């Protein structure tokens, strides 16, 4: 019997591996090497045409000038780190890589752990994961509307202004001003107006204002009424009515009262009394105001609070990162929840029996056991934010788009967005590739270790 065969219960001879027999090498499935290569050839051709060739061409193109006619060496790479716009893109990309993946991973971990303890956890996971079903373009349009400056259109500022106005009184008549032709109210700094004369008991003060259309007054204003009585009184009203007519500086029929205007009595620069006009525009001051000047403070006329400039130069990047977190928190939650389902519950119970509280169990048992999954999620998201483009291009308005710039957007602008410099664009593409390679290596290494277990 040949050394390359063995007996198997006397039922015949089975072939065994033997060096130098000259038999073709086969895989574990019994497929010959040349057959495997034949089947892989179409995929290899596509890989070469769609991945290898573009990378090689980009490397070559990055060494030439804008139109590709002159060799410039590494000048394009030097320009990236010396031009203000590309330096801003590099800085913002670093912020994205450092902040966005960490936020998404932490939120995903929190959601995955907490949803295990509630009955409606599945429904919650579905709601959190739903944003993944829409495209980046659709998410960008949604958050462009969310971050609109006008509180009547932007949800974010509608919430902010509602909370602000609940604690801070807002101006009712931001565009109102005294009628300079007939009123002795003069600007006195800080948006306030102070009378040049003094108020006397029994002589009602007239404080006519203009600058607002009668049909633009808030609510349902009443007709103004001339103040009467022996005390220190007066009237604040809109000295104008639709259709015109009437006497300037006098309370005429049909002219509207200005309700809620604060009036202060000032003596020697000190406020000695104050009052607020009623629904008919009249007000009454105590006797201490006799002989004082009347002042309408600037709070009556200050511009209304319009919320936060979310898409301004300062907050545009954090605002867009917020939209990214909204989209990808569900992705992190689902992957971490899958890893959490494989955690041995006996280890958690053992920690509780040993006296650990829930925070200690989470920090010292759950998180270490989930470390491999957390690393995969974090690295995957870091690779993803390297090529973030859609959200920034859609959400950031043109005046602040340069402040929100990232490398992927700069690549587009340099090559196709009017720059026409394919050399710099190719150089940015190669830099992005070099930045992504270490993260890909970490992921591949992690997958190999998992396969060997």
Image: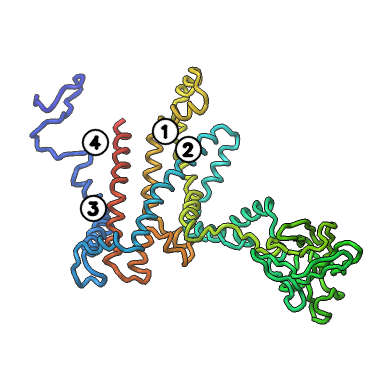
Determine the CA span between mark 4 and mark 2: 39 Å
Q: Position of residue 10 (x, y in %)?
A: 19, 20
- Secondary structure under tag 4 reads loop
Nearest the camera: 411 or 72? 72
**The C terminus sits in image quarter:** top left
Q: Position of residue 435 (x, y in %)?
A: 30, 51
Q: Which mark is residue 109?
A: 2
Q: Position of residue 381 (x, y in %)?
A: 40, 47
Q: Earlier in the sequence, mark 3 or mark 1?
A: 3
Contact, mark 4 vs mark 3 (Cβ under 8 Å): no
Q: Which mark is residue 28?
A: 4
Local crowd at mark 4 within 10 Å, few (<14), some, or many (≥20)? few
Q: Which residue is most to the top?
A: 354
Q: Earlier in the sequence, mark 4 or mark 2?
A: 4
Local crowd at mark 3 within 10 Å, few (<14), some, or many (≥20)? few
Q: Is residue 296 visible?
A: yes
- Secondary structure under tag 1 reads loop
Q: Which residue is mark 1?
A: 370
Question: Residue 153 is drawn in which quadrant?
Answer: bottom right
Determine the CA span between mark 1 and mark 4: 33 Å
Colour mapping used in the image: rainbow
């Amino acid at each position: 019997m040949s050394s390359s065969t063995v007996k198997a219960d006397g039922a015949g001879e089975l072939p065994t591996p033997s060096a130098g027999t000259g038999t073709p090498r086969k895989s574990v499935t019994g497929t010959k090497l040349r057959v495997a290569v034949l089947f892989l050839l179409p995929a290899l051709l596509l890989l070469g045409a769609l991945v290898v060739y573009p990378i090689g061409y980009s490397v070559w193109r990055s060494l030439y000038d804008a139109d590709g006619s002159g060799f410039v060496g590494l000048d394009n790479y030097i320009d990236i780190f010396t031009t203000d716009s590309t330096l801003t893109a590099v800085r913002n990309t670093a912020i994205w890589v450092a902040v966005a993946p960490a936020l998404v991973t932490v939120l995903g971990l929190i959601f995955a752990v907490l949803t295990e303890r509630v009955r409606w956890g599945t429904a919650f996971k579905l709601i959190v994961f739903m944003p993944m079903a829409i495209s980046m373009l659709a998410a960008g349009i949604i958050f462009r509307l969310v971050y609109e400056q006008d509180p009547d259109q932007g949800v974010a500022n509608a919430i902010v202004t509602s909370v602000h106005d609940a604690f801070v009184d807002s101006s009712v008549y931001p565009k109102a001003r005294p009628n300079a032709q007939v009123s002795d109210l003069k600007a006195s700094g800080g948006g306030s107006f102070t009378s040049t004369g003094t108020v006397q008991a029994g002589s009602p003060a007239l404080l006519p204002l203009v600058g607002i259309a009668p049909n633009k007054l808030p609510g349902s204003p009443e007709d103004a009424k001339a103040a009467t009585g022996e005390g220190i009184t007066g009237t604040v009203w809109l000295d104008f009515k639709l259709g015109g007519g009437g006497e300037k500086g006098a309370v005429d029929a049909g002219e509207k009262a200005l309700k809620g205007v604060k009036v202060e009595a000032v003596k020697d620069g000190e406020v000695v009394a104050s009052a607020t006009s009623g629904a008919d525009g009249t007000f009454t001051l105590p006797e201490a105001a006799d002989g004082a000047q009347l002042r309408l403070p600037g709070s009556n006329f200050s511009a209304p609070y319009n919320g936060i400039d979310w898409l301004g130069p300062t907050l545009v990047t954090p605002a867009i990162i917020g939209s990214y977190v909204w989209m990808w928190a569900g992705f992190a939650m689902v992957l971490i929840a899958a890893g959490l389902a494989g955690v041995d519950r006996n280890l958690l119970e053992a920690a509780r029996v040993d006296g650990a509280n829930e925070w200690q169990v989470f920090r010292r048992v759950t998180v270490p056991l989930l470390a491999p999954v957390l690393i995969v999620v974090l690295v995957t998201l870091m690779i993803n934010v390297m090529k973030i483009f859609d959200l920034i291009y859609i959400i950031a308005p043109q005046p602040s788009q340069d402040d929100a710039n990232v490398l992927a957007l700069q690549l587009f602008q340099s090559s196709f967005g009017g720059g026409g410099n394919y050399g710099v664009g190719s150089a940015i593409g190669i830099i992005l590739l070099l930045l992504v390679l270490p993260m890909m290596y970490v992921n591949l290494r992690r997958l190999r270790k998992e396969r060997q277990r």
